[in-house]
Amino acid sequence: MLSYRHGFHAGNPADVFKHAVLIALIRALQEKPRAIQFVDTHAGPALYDLADPVAQKNREYASGIGRWWPLRDLDPLMQAYLELVRSFNPAGALERYPGSPMIFRRLLRPNDKLVLCELHPAEQKALKTRFDGDPQVRLRLGNGYEQIGKVLPPPGGRGLVLIDPPWELKTEMDDLTASLERAVRLFAHGVYLVWYPMIEGREISLAELPDRLGLSPERWLDLRLEFAPEQRLGRMYGCGLALINCPYRVRQTLLDWHRDFSAPAR
Ligand SMILES: C[S@@+](CC[C@H](N)C(=O)[O-])C[C@H]1O[C@@H](n2cnc3c(N)ncnc32)[C@H](O)[C@@H]1O
């Protein structure tokens, strides 16, 4: 059942899109000094060695971070993303790619906290190796959809939840909807970021969620990205990011950026 391993996909075009938006959101929330609790419901193993045979199998990173890597003087959002990835590769060559737990951890301020959930035993082991004993990180090694109810609302009243499932199970949409209903009941003004794939022959749409969750249009943002033909990953031709309660200032930035965002030519 747990066949998905993000190591095969780390740094691909979907990761670039998701992580660039994630960094912009974290930074926007951190403009205010009050502590934030970040929750990563589907964390993955945190850091990826791109020379590993798993990453080399399909080399998905080549059409993702691999294309952005040599570029300089980008727009502020992509510049911030690339600088963060570069900080994991101090020798200058692209060798390692940070997953969302590492991105969160790198950006935590001393008063912020991070909660990581993960179901796969191998990924849990990797998370334990990296974060056991870290006073700012709490591992909740179980079903992220269930853990949400146990960690919300955050102690200080400010929080961001990333929900980044593999979308391999038929129940994924129902699980997501039920868990978001619970989360929004517990923490109505929390910021939520949900990743979903666009797959030929299996249209996934989150368009019904705002109604189900009782969200007014200004509390909902759905950014969809179609990959360039050569970036397609099998039947996956793009991906989307749904945001709930996106802070007002970054909302316009994201909309402007998203309008112009496209992968650089090789
Ligand atoms: C797309 S990957 C996460 C990638 C990571 N968020 C990132 O951006 O670097 C999805 C992860 O969710 C894990 N997973 C699958 N079902 C889960 C569940 N119900 N609760 C927690 N983790 C789950 C998988 O083992 C996998 O590591």
Image: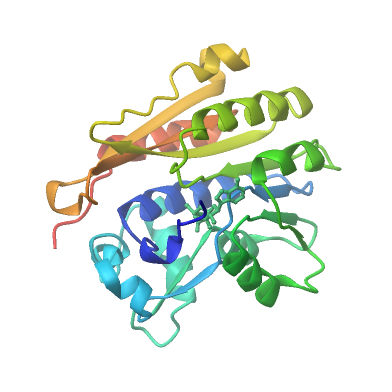
- Residue 140 vs residue 265: left or right? right
Closer to us: 16 or 47: 47
- Looking at the rendered structure, the number of numbered marks drawn on it comes to 0
Q: Which residue is rendered at x = 20% and y = 53% of the image?
A: 231
Q: Residue furthest front?
A: 1
Instruction: Tell me if I can see residue 154 in this picture.
Output: yes
Q: Which residue is rendered at x = 26% and y = 71% of the image?
A: 70
Instruction: Tell me if I can see residue 189 in this picture.
Output: no
- Residue 115 vs residue 106: left or right? right
Hey, which quadrant is residue 93 in on the image? bottom left
Q: Which residue is rendered at x = 28% and y = 63% of the image?
A: 60
Colour approach in the figure: rainbow
Q: Which residue is rendered at x = 23% and y = 43% of the image?
A: 235
Q: Position of residue 24 (x, y in %)?
A: 50, 48
Q: Residue furthest right?
A: 155
- Residue 102 vs residue 167: left or right? right
Q: Position of residue 208 (x, y in %)?
A: 47, 16
Hey, which quadrant is residue 28 in on the image? top right
Quadrant of the drawing holding the C terminus: bottom left
Q: Position of residue 265 (x, y in %)?
A: 14, 57
Q: Position of residue 150 (x, y in %)?
A: 81, 41
